[in-house]
Image: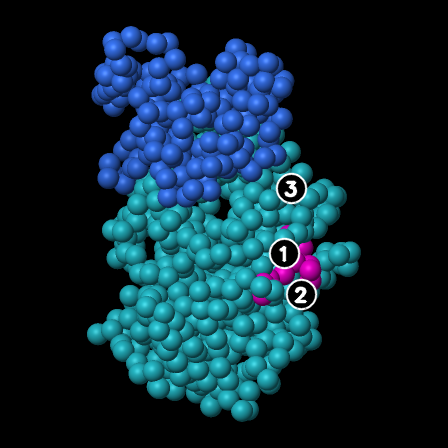
Chain colours: A cyan, B blue
Amino acid sequence: MVAKFAMDDDSVVVVIGSGAGGGTLSNELAQKGIKVVCLEAGKRHEIQDFVNDEWKSFSQISWLDKRTTSGTWRVAKDFPNLPAWIVKAVGGSTVHWAGASLRFQEHEFKARTTYGEVEGANLLDWPVTLAEMEPYYDKAEFKMGTTGTNGIPRLPGNNNYKVLAAGAKKLGYAEFHTGNMSINSKPRDGRGSCQQIGFCFQGCKSGAKWSTLYTEIPKGEATGNLEVRPDAQVLKIEHDAKGKVNAVLYADSTGAIHRQKARIVAVAGNSIESPRLLLNSASTMFPDGLANSSGQVGRNYMRHMTGSVYALFDRPVHMYRGTTMAGIIRDESRFDPRRGFVGGYEMETLSLGVPFMAAFLDPGAWGRDFSSALDAYDHMAGMWLVGEDMPRETNRVTLHASEKDKFGLPIPNVNFDDHPNDIAMRTHAYGRGSAVYDAVGAVRTIHTPPYPSTHNLGTNRMSANARDGVVNKWGQAHDVKNLFVSDGSQFTSGGSENPTLTIVALAIRQADYIADQMGKREI
Amino acid sequence: MRVLDKRIRLNRRNFLKTSAASMAAAGAVSGGIVSIGATPAWAEALTVVKPDAAKTLLVMVRDLYPHDRLSDAYYETALASMDQAAAKDATLAGQLNEGAVALDAAARKLHGSPYAAIKAEKDRVAVLKSIETTPFFAKVRGDMVVALYNQPEVWAKLGYEGASAEYGGYIHRGFDDIDWIKDA
C-alpha cells in the first residue's frame, strides 16, 4: 500500500530528488520505519516508456529547464544553455547513467594532504576516510548488484571492449576488464540479465541496469512509509524562528503551489539545482542563502576532467552493440605527479549512436574532415576519459541576475574554467587514448571535447570545519541541523571515479545517521 | 562477424520521392515546354523557403555534411524540417531566405557566380568559410547536423542499426562478434 501523507504532517522527512542520492535515502529511511515524502521535479516514466532513440529520449528524460553558462570551458561555447546532461524524471540520473560503480581510492579522500597546495585550487581533505566508507561501499555494491563484487561475474566484453582491451594489452597496461558495473550479468533481485541492447543512456529497457526508479523507489513504497510525488518542482525551503527547517514549498504540474511540512529536509537535486535551491531559500535570518554562512554554497563546482577518443579502423567494429560503457582501463587512475598533474583518470569505453555522434564528435565542425568520420561510423571504437578535476572557488553555480524561470525564481548560471591541472591531465589522457587505439592499427583518432557535464559535484561540499564547506561528514548542514545534502554536491573532491557508487554509499550511511539522531531526539 | 550492407539501393521511399518529383515537375510546366531552370518538386513543396533559396541551401547543406553515397533526398528531408520550423517562425524564414541571398552574394564576390553554380567543392567551401561566423551559417549548420543525421535511412547507410530492444538487443546479434581482434 503506497503511503499518502498530509501536507501538514510535520513528522515526515522530505527528500528533494529521487536519483542515486534521494531515491536511495528515501528507501533506506522507509525501510527503517521513517515516513518519507520524496518530491521529484520530473515525471514518472516507467521502463516501457523508454525509447531506443537518442533525440526522442533526450527530449523525454533530460533536464531541459533553461540554464546559462559562463567561463572559458568549451561547453559554454558549444552548449551555452545545457551545462549538464542529466535527467528530470523519477529515478533522476540513475535512469541515464552507464552503470560504472567504482570505489574512491584512499588517497582521493585526502586530496589536500596527498596533492599538497595546488595554486588556484581550493583542495580540502574529506572529513571521511576510505576505512569509514568501506562498510557502506559493501552495502551499496550488494544493493546495486555490482559486477566483480559479491561473487557477481563481470559482464562479457563487446566489440568496443575487445578493441580497447587489445590496445591496453599491447601497451602493457595491467588493470583492464569489463568493469564494476551495476548491470545484472545474471538475473538478480527480481531483475533479468543484460541483453546487450545498447542505449544505456536512454533508460534500460530490460531493467538489468540498477536505477532507483525500479529498485529503491518501489521497495520503499512497498513499506507504506514512502510517498513519491512526481511533477513536484521545489521552490523554497522554509525555516522556523529558531532557524530549523520546517517546510518545503513546491509547484505541481498545474503550477499550483503547495507547502509540505517537514521534520527534516534532505536536498538531492544534483549539483546545479541543489545549491540553487539553497540560494533561492534566502531569508532575513539567512540572507546569503540557507546553510551558507561559509559562503561556499554553489562554489567548488566540479565536473570531472573529461574528453573522448574515437578511433577509425579499416575493419568493422560496431561499437554501439551492447553496453555503452563496456570496459575500463584503470592504470592511469593512480596518483603519479611525474605525469605532470595531480590526480588520475579512468579510460572507459563509450559509444554514441549516429545522431549523438554527429552532435558531439566535434561540435561546430563541418566539411569532409567531419563527415568522413561518420562515413566510417561502423568502423569506429570509442572511449571516455574521466579524471579528477580541481575544485575552485570561482567555478560556481550562482543565481542569474535577471533571468527567471516560470515560477519567477532566478535560473542558475554555471561558471567554469579548466584548471591548468585539468588541461595537463586531458592532454595526457588524449595521448594515452590514441596510443591504445594506435597499438591495434587505428587509421585515425579523434579527440572529442567534453560533453555537457554528467558528473556534477562539489557545490555543497563536506568539510570538517564549518568555515570551509556547507555540510559535515554526514551531509548535515553545518548551520541547520535538520537539513541534509544527499547528492554529489556534498563531495569534497571529485576523485577519478564515476560518482554514483559513492553517492549511494553516502546515502545509506546518512540514513543510518538520520535514524540514529531522530531516535536520540537530536533532530 | 555480422556486418551491414551500406550500399545504395533504390528503396521504396526514394523511388516514390523520385517519381513523384518527376510527375509534379512535369505538371508544373505550363504549355508543355520543359525549361532547364524548372523548380524541382521538393523545393516547390516547401512552405516559406523560396525555391531559389532552397536550391542554394541544398548545395550548402551537402557541402556542410558531404556524403557522396547519400542522394539528395536525405538532404531535402533535412531542409524540409527546417522549412516546417520556419513556417511557424517568421524571423527564421527571413533568416533562411536572406541568408541564401547573402551566400550567393559572397559567392559572386569570391568566384563571380552564384553559390550553387560554382563547380569545385573547394571553392564553395571557401565561400562558406567566408560566412562561417554569421548567425545564418550557425543556424543552418546546427539544425542540419541534427536533422540530417536523425534519419533512420541515413543510419543504415552509415552502418548504424538504430533501436535494438525490440529485437532482443544484441546478445544474440553480434555484440561480441569482432573477428579481427584475436587477443582480448
Residue at position x 53%, y 76% in the image: A281
The chain identifier of the residue carrying mark 1 reads A
Q: Quadrant of residue A129?
A: bottom right
Left or right of B66 on screen, residue A231: left
Q: Nearer the viewer, residue A318 or A229?
A: A229
Q: CA distance from mark 2 to mark 1?
A: 23 Å
Residue mark closest to the camera, 2 vs 3: 3
Q: Secondary structure at mark 3?
A: helix
The residue under label 2 is: A125
| Residue B68 position in % (x across, y down) | 43, 16
Q: Earlier in the sequence, mark 1 or mark 3?
A: 1
Q: Earlier in the sequence, mark 2 or mark 1?
A: 2
Residue at position x 63%, y 39% in the image: A429
What segment carries the magenta color?
A: A389-400
Residue B159 appears in the rendering: no
The residue under label 3 is: A426
Q: Residue furthest front?
A: B31
| Disc 1: CA contacts within 10 A as few (<14), some (14-19) or many (>=20) | many
| Disc 2: CA contacts within 10 A as few (<14), some (14-19) or many (>=20) | some
The chain identifier of the residue carrying mark 3 reads A
Q: Are dots 2 and 3 on a single chain?
A: yes
| Kind of residue sitting beneath label 3 | Arg
| Residue A268 position in % (x across, y down) | 47, 67
Q: Nearer the viewer, residue A127 or A484?
A: A484
Q: Secondary structure at mark 2?
A: loop
| Disc 3: CA contacts within 10 A as few (<14), some (14-19) or many (>=20) | many
The residue under label 1 is: A415
Residue A430 appears in the rendering: yes
Q: Earlier in the sequence, mark 2 or mark 3?
A: 2
Q: Is residue A347 above or below residue A183?
A: above
